[in-house]
Image (spheres, rainbow, N blue to C red):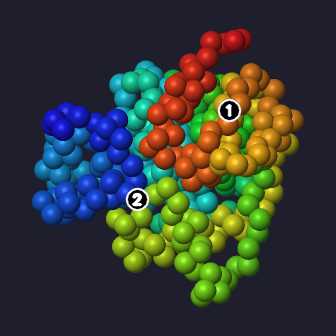
Amino acid sequence: VGPDDDFFLLGGHSLLAARVVGRARDMFPALGIRHLFAHPTPAGLAAAGRDTAHAGRDLDPLLLLREAPPGGTDLFCVHPVGGLSWCYAPLAHRLAPGTRVHGLQSPVLLGAPAPGTVEELAEVYTERIRQARPPGPLALLGWSLGGTLAHAMAARLEAAGERVSGLVLLDALPEAPVARPAREAPEQEDELLELALAGQPASVLDGQGRERVAAATRAALRLGGQAGAGRVGAPTLIVEAVPPGHEPMGLAAAWAPLLTGPVEAHTLATDHAGIVSADAARLLGPLVDRTLHRPTGG
């Protein structure tokens, strides 16, 4: 491994990401998982560690997952049920060089109140994008609950006259998760965190961080509403996880009434969490690129 080799292109995944950050903190205590996302080479990570002025926190509402030169597509990846967008890093680094990738994370991670419906949360995130992104093509991606939110956001943006260059729905349904009680029984806490941290390098979180992820998960599981009546005309990629021996649920058909543009649908032989794994990223990267850069009218 050389100083300029990309961790994720070498096959890096969430468990290894946590180990890299843990080891790097022996020399640079202020390093966070966000620095590995933005600087995924040994040389880049060392430079970030020496920069004592670097800002940002791993739980911030908007996280840079992959840098790119100005003028390219800005892809915003919406968090799944646990509120963290860290799981998208392997895929982010498999996309075309001109795509800058951002992770949208739950406001609950920093103690903010949680909106009560999918539509309300989609409005919060849509406004966050408007405030943060530079001019240029805009695309949205989401896994699980993140896909439900990404669709609602795309519909809002298009209704406001903005162009969405692509929408990617990874094993997502056009509805919010089944609501759970406001208080979890103690014996359900481990199950809750396991759900929330699927696909995430969770070992870099301290106790407070894990508590915030649990809180974000409770808030997400109490969201009401569907993806909304709004339809999306952007080119859309739908990928459904189908474990070996199982039959597809038919996600493309479920989304069809809410999509008016070109749709490409695939299945992937993995489980729900596996769809954001490093192995899946190798397969998904070209599909996502094709969707984001599809010619108008294609």
Which of the 4 image quarters holds residue 275?
top right
Q: From the viewer's perspective, is the residue at label 1 or at label 2 nearer?
A: 1
Q: Which residue is mark 1?
A: 266
Image coords of residue 255 (percent x, y): 80, 39
Confirm whether residue 131 shows in the render: no
In the rendered structure, the answer to whether residue 254 lies left or right of residue 218 reads right
Tell me what residue is drawn at x 40 percent, y 77 percent.
207
Q: Give above or below for 165 relative to 153.
A: above
**Amino acid under disc 1:** His
What secondary structure is marked by label 2? Answer: loop
Q: Quadrant of the C terminus?
A: top right
Nearer the N terminus, badge 1 or badge 2?
2
Which of the 4 image quarters holds residue 97?
top left
Residue placed most toward the observer, 70 or 35: 35
- Report crowding for label 1: few under 14, some 14 to 19, many 20 or more residues within 10 A (C-alpha): some
Tell me what residue is drawn at x 44 percent, y 37 percent.
92
Image coords of residue 68 (percent x, y): 37, 29
**Amino acid under disc 2:** Pro
Tell me what residue is drawn at x 45 percent, y 72 percent.
210
> Which residue reaches farthest bottom?
186
What secondary structure is marked by label 1? Answer: strand
Distance, label 1 to label 2, CA atoms, is 27 Å
